[in-house]
Amino acid sequence: MVTPFSGAIQFFLCFSYLLIMIIIGLTGGIASGKSTVAGILAEDKQVVVIDADEIAHSVLVKGSGPYAAAVKEFGRKIVKKDGSIDRDVLGGIIFSDDAARKKLNAITHTAIGLGIAKSVLKALFTGVRYVIIDAPLLLETPAHFICDEVVIVDTTVATQKTRLLARSKNLTEKDADARIAAQNTAEQRQALASKVRSFTLNINNDGDLDDLKRKANSMLRQCKSNSGPLSQGRLQQYLLAIILVPFLIWFFLF
C-alpha cells in the first residue's frame, strides 16, 4: 500500500536519480549511422539506449488509437493480411508526400513522446547513469529539451544512399532518393540545432566501423565531462521539477 509518506519518499528518490542521470539525445539523417553509434554506446554498462523508432513501431500495433487513426487516414492498403501495418506501403506513401508525412506525425508523435517519457522513467528505477535517446526527429520535437547533450551523426548523401540501398533490398534508387529528400539535409539539421540548442556535438560518419567506434567513445567521454549542473538540458529538468514538485508534494501529502 502506498501511503502519503511512502509516496513522497518514492518521488524524492526518483527526483534524486533524475539529477544524477545524464540524458544524451542522438539524432541524424536516415542511414547516417546513428543507430550504429547507439549500439556502440550501449556496450557501456552505464548506458541505456531508448530507440524512438522502436517506440514508433509499437504505437502502431493493431488495436491502438494511432493504429485506428492511421488506417482511417491512409486506408486499408497499409494493412497486411494479419492486420499489422505494412510499413513498406506506409513508408512509400509518407516519403513521397509531405502532407501525408505530416498527418502521420500528427497521429503518432504524442504517443511516441509518452513512450519516450515512460522509458526514461523506467531507466530512473534501474539507477543507470546515462540514457541515450536515439531519435531521427529529436531537434524537431520537444524531446531535445530534456537532453543534457545533443549529438548529431551525419554523412554524405551519396553514402546515405549506398547504405540505404544495401540494407533495404526492396528499395529502388528513386525510393532511396525520396526518403533522403524527406528529411533535413545535414546543413539544415545543423542550422536547426543552432536555433534550439546552445551547443551540440557532431560525429562525421564517413569512415569505417573502427573509426566510428573511436568517434562514438570519444563523444561519450566528452558528454560525461560536459554534463554538469548548468548544462542546457539540466536547466530544463530543474525548471520542470520546480513546476512539478509543489503539485506532487500536495498530491502525496494532502
Image (spheres, rainbow, N blue to C red):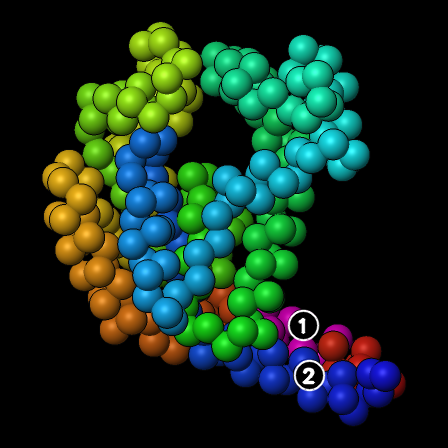
Residue 189 in the image: state x and y as whole percent: 33, 37
Give the residue at x 73% y 13%.
76
> In what element is the residue under mark 1?
helix
Q: Is residue 116 left or right of residue 184?
A: right
Q: Residue furthest front?
A: 82
Q: Residue furthest bottom?
A: 5
Quadrant containing the N terminus in the rendered view = bottom right
Tell me if residue 244 is in the magenta stretch: yes
Looking at the picture, which amino acid does disc 1 mark? Answer: Leu
Q: Is residue 125 visible in this depiction of the protein?
A: yes
Q: Is residue 17 left or right of residue 174?
A: right
Q: Which residue is mark 1?
A: 244
Give the residue at x 20% y 21%.
158
Q: Is residue 99 visible in this depiction of the protein?
A: no
Give the residue at x 75% y 75%.
247
Mark 1 / mark 2, whichever is N-terminal? 2
Give the residue at x 71% y 22%.
82
- Say how many tags the image has: 2
Residue stretch rendered in magenta on the structure: 240-247
Q: Which residue is mark 2?
A: 10
The image quadrant that residue 186 belongs to is: top left
Q: Nearer the viewer, mark 1 or mark 2?
A: 2
User: Is disc 1 in contact with disc 2, using a CB cutoff of under 8 Å?
Assistant: no
